[in-house]
Amino acid sequence: MKGFFGVNEHPIERVARVVLGIGILSLAFVGPKSPWAYIGIVPILTGALGNCPLYSLLGFSTCPVQKRV
């Protein structure tokens, strides 16, 4: 399970996800005020945790890996 919940996002991608999520979530309070804007919570959580479940399922990672010597 450690591999499933490990960090698999690049730091820049994490920041972009949080910023995008906040932008989407803000639409629930300003603008069209659509309840669909609460979907912005998903990129905020994945960016904050550094783990994308879809990346884990597909075996994909954008996180720079340091080689152990």
Image (tube, rainbow, N blue to C red):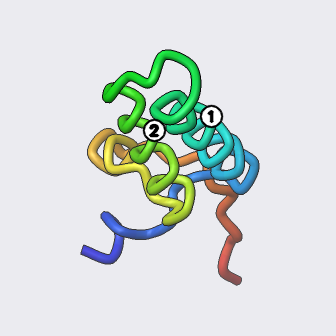
Question: How many circles with numbers are drawn on the protein?
Answer: 2
Which quadrant is the N terminus positioned in? Answer: bottom left
34 left or right of 69?
Answer: left
For mark 1, give the secondary structure: helix
Left or right, 58 with respect to 31, comes to left
Residue 59: x and y in percent read 36, 46
Q: Residues within 10 Å of mark 2 (few under 14, many from 20)?
A: many
Q: What is the x, y in percent for residue 11?
A: 71, 56
Q: Residue at x 45, y 56 (%)?
A: 45
Name the mark on residue 67: none
Mark 1 neighbour density, 10 Å: few (under 14) some (14–19) many (20 or more): some
Q: Tag 2's secondary structure? A: helix
Task: Establish if 6 lies above or below 43.
Answer: below
Amino acid type at mark 1: Gly
Tell me which residue sits at (33%, 77%) in the image. 2
Circle 1 residue: 23
* In the image: residue 29, left or right of residue 35: right
Q: CA distance from mark 2 to mark 1?
A: 8 Å
Residue 26, picture quadrant = top right
Residue occupied by mark 2 = 40
Q: Is residue 29 above or below residue 50?
A: above
Q: Amino acid at mark 2?
A: Gly
| Contact? badges 2 and 1 (CB < 8 Å) | yes
